[in-house]
Amino acid sequence: MHVRESTPPFHTLLDHLRARVSDRIAQGEVTERSLARQAGISQSHLHNILKGIRGMTPDVADKLMTTLQLKLSDLQGANVHAKPGRTTRERE
């Protein structure tokens, strides 16, 4: 019998994406400004998302994942150390 691996809750995946994006910026692979430009969002909005000031919408998450060529499976790994941020529901 095959046991399906469970998918983490959506907010956990968003936290993992936030951590992946932050890591890539910290490692110098991309800058906040260039990533925001490529993803079609403002740099200030991206900055606020990464700092946990703003929540990440599914649309923005999709844009970032597409720009960074990430797959959902990339966000499920144990090597991700996500810093909790505000969820979409907690935005002002």
Image: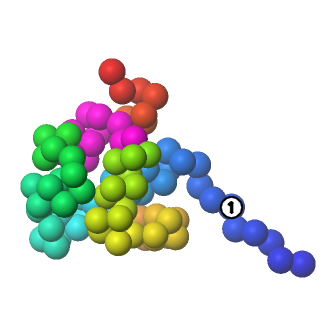
Give residue 69's quadrant in the image. Answer: bottom left
Against 52, is 29 above or below? below
- Disc 1 element: loop
The reply to whether residue 5 is visible in this rendering is yes
The reply to whether the magenta stretch includes residue 47 is yes
Q: Nearest the camera: 40 or 24?
A: 40
Residue bearing the label numbered 1: 6
| Disc 1 packing (10 Å; few <14; some 14–19; many ≥20) | few
Q: How many marks?
A: 1
Kindly identify the residue that appears in the image at 49 percent across and 44 percent down.
Answer: 11
Kindly identify the residue that appears in the image at 36 percent across and 62 percent down.
Answer: 65
Q: Position of residue 76 (x, y in %)?
A: 52, 65
Give residue 56's quadrant in the image. Answer: top left
In the picture as drawn, the residue positioned furthest to the bottom comes out as 1
Q: Amino acid at mark 1?
A: Ser
Give residue 80's quadrant in the image. Answer: bottom left
Q: Position of residue 16 (x, y in %)?
A: 41, 57
Kindly identify the residue that appears in the image at 28 percent across and 60 percent down.
Answer: 21
Q: Nearest the camera: 36 or 53?
A: 36
Q: Position of residue 19 (x, y in %)?
A: 33, 57
In the picture as drawn, the residue positioned furthest to the top comes out as 92
Range drawn in magenta? 46-57
- For residue 86, side relative to residue 10 (left or right): left
Against 50, is 81 above or below? below
Kindly identify the residue that appears in the image at 89 percent across and 78 percent down.
Answer: 1
Q: What scheme was used to colour the molecule? A: rainbow
- For residue 60, side relative to residue 40 (left or right): right
